[in-house]
Image: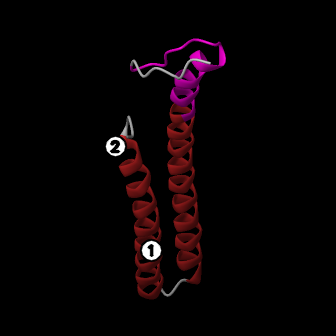
Amino acid sequence: MERYPVLRIVVGLSNVIAYGLAALLVVVGGILGAIQESILTLIGSVILAFLVWLGMKAYSEVIQVFVNIEKNTRLYQDILPLARGQDEIKGGVKTPQA
């Protein structure tokens, strides 16, 4: 069972928000570019949308790395007593005696 399931939700929502904001910025830029009859407004909004998308994706990847580090650290802490030859692991589950 996951220790921090909320972080998984944050990662998923970050990805959804990244795509949503990027699409919204492209649409708004297209509308503003059409109103002002300026291609530079459209190009600027596409670049801004890409940068927002890139930032949100980077944020979700960093959170995912933290989740993986925490999960692997916990796994290592559970396995370490077995590697040292102890007959118990965290949680009181005994290993077979040789």
Residue 65 lies, in percent from the top left, at 57, 41
Q: Which residue is mark 2?
A: 6
Disc 1 element: helix
Report the quarter where the N terminus lies. Answer: top left
Q: Nearer the viewer, residue 77 or 45?
A: 77
Secondary structure of the residue carrying numbered label 2: helix
Q: Which residues are magenta?
A: 72-91
Residue in the image at 56% along x and 27% along y: 73
Q: Main SS type for the magenta part?
A: helix
Q: Residues within 10 Å of mark 2 (few under 14, many from 20)?
A: few
- Amino acid marked by disc 1: Ala
Q: Nearer the viewer, mark 2 or mark 1?
A: 2
Q: Is residue 90 magenta?
A: yes
Vertical arrangement, residue 24 with respect to residue 36, above or below:
above
Residue 21, x across and y down, in percent: 42, 65
Q: Residue at x 49, y 19 (%)?
A: 89
Q: Earlier in the sequence, mark 2 or mark 1?
A: 2
Image quarter hosting the C terminus: top right
Disc 1 crowd, CA 10 A, few/some/many (<14, 14-19, 20+): some
Residue in the image at 42% along x and 22% along y: 93
Q: How many marks on residues?
A: 2
Q: Which mark is residue 23?
A: 1
Amino acid type at circle 2 is Val
Q: Is residue 41 magenta?
A: no
Residue 6: percent from the left, percent from the top?
34, 43
